[in-house]
Amino acid sequence: TFLNKAHEYNRNNIPKELSVDIDVKKAIDKLEIMYLDDDEKLIYENERKIKLDKFEEIRTAEFKGIEKGREEGKAEGEKLAKIEIAKNCLEKNMDIETISLITGLSVEEIRGL
């Protein structure tokens, strides 16, 4: 019976028993789109495209942010590992220039440890 009376329904006029069904809500949204005239459909499609483009921009920015965070975390971890190696080398009384060659840390960084 839903389809027989579908033309009577819209977002603001859904029987209570149907309003809880997500699929019915989606169907009513689709019907509303189907009932749009050509100008209204063009406006709807343009607005929909803008929303989808914005969503994709956000998703891309989030992905780039996650990747940047991973890269920064990896670089920080590598730096901490080099510092730990340098500290161990200093404890073994290795000369600073050799430690610098091994770790890639500057002589000044090593002296600061």
Image (spheres, rainbow, N blue to C red):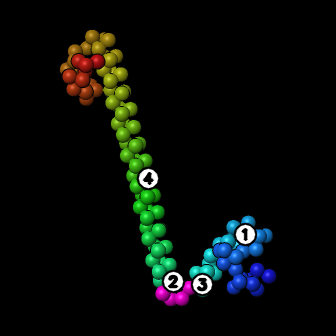
Classify 10 Å Cα crowding around label 3: few (below 14), some (14-19), many (20 and above).
few
Residue highlighted by disc 1 = 19
Q: As shown in the figure, which amino acid type bears the numbered disc 4?
A: Glu
Dot placed on the residue nearer the N-terminal end, 4 or 1: 1
Mark 3 touches mark 4? (CB < 8 Å): no
Q: Residue at x 33, y 30 (%)?
A: 79
Residue highlighted by disc 2 = 41
Dot placed on the residue nearer the N-terminal end, 3 or 2: 3
Mark 4 or mark 1, whichever is nearer to me: 1
Q: As shown in the figure, which amino acid type bears the numbered disc 1?
A: Ser
Residue highlighted by disc 4 = 62
Q: Residue at x 47, y 74 (%)?
A: 47
Q: Is residue 77 visible?
A: yes
Q: As shown in the figure, which amino acid type bears the numbered disc 2?
A: Lys
Which is nearer the eye, 108 or 20?
20
Task: Kindly state the secondary structure of the residue where label 1 is placed.
Answer: helix
Task: Kindly state the secondary structure of the residue where label 2 is placed.
Answer: helix
The kind of secondary structure the magenta stretch mainly shows is helix
Between marks 2 and 4, how big is the CA–CA gap?
A: 31 Å
